Image (cartoon, helix red, strand yellow):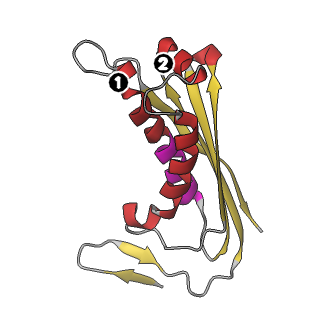
Amino acid sequence: MEDANSSGLKQIYVGDKEVVFREAVAEGYIKLRRETIERVESKNVEKGDPLTLARLGGIAGSKYTPLLLPLCHNIRIEAVDVDAWIDKSSSRIGVRARVRAHEKTGVEMEALVAAMTALLNIWDMVKQYEKDERGQYPHTAVEFVRIVSKTKE
């Protein structure tokens, strides 16, 4: 069963589905200047530690998913874990978000929003070091955000 309105947008009815354990893991990276990576590693970022804020921001972001994605169901998230690490060899910071719940619908969107929010928090923390002389970001890029695993039991 689907609910539709005059716009043609539909939210899928999940009321008849069984509640089961669901987990999704999303991963992504932010490419930064080598100098910025060194600042993060040496804890020399004026705003504070981007890796800590990425973890907190990712957790918070996952919980706002239905507000950001209007057709996404509001679910009871049971756990969100966000990890962030420096990959010095590729001049990137990686994040991995794991979301778990017992629900009628999946948690992939919550994991993706957690990963993206974590990455955007990193960008916000280091943007002053990433800008060129024209105020542009020629080296900064969010990359390869994807679901790396999904479980439904």
**Residue type indicated by callout 2:** Thr
Image quadrant of residue 144? Answer: top right
Residue 34 is one of the magenta-drawn residues? no
Q: Residue at x 49, y 33 (%)?
A: 48
Residue at figure coordinates x 45%, y 63% from the top left: 64
Measured as percent of width and height from the top left, residue 1 is found at 48, 85
User: Count the marks: how many?
Assistant: 2
Relative depth, front residue between 46 and 116: 46
Pointer 1 residue:
128
Whether residue 112 is visible to the viewer of this picture, yes or no, is no
Q: Which residue corresponds to the image point at 24% horizontal and 73% vertical from the top-left? A: 7
Badge number at residue 13: none
How would you rate the neighbour count of disc 1 (Cα within 10 Å): few for under 14, some for 14-19, many for 20 or more? some
Task: Report x, y in % for residue 16.
Answer: 60, 87
15 left or right, relative to 125: right
Residue carrying label 2: 36
Amino acid at pointer 1: Gln
The answer to whether residue 106 is left or right of residue 69 is: right
**113 or 59: nearer the viewer:** 59
Q: Is residue 129 visible?
A: yes
Q: Secondary structure at mark 1?
A: helix
Circle 2 residues within 10 Å: few <14, some 14–19, many ≥20 = many
Residue at (59% x, 17% y) in the render: 90
What is the magenta range? 108-118
What secondary structure is marked by label 2?
Answer: helix
Assign the C terminus to one quadrant of the image.
bottom right
Per the model, the C-alpha gap separating discs 1 and 2 is 10 Å
Mark 1 and mark 2 lie on one chain; the one further toward the N terminus is 2
Residue 46 left/right relative to 19: left
Q: Where 31 falls versus 9 (above or below)?
A: above
- Dominant SS in magenta: helix
- Residue 20 horizontal/vertical position (percent): 72, 75
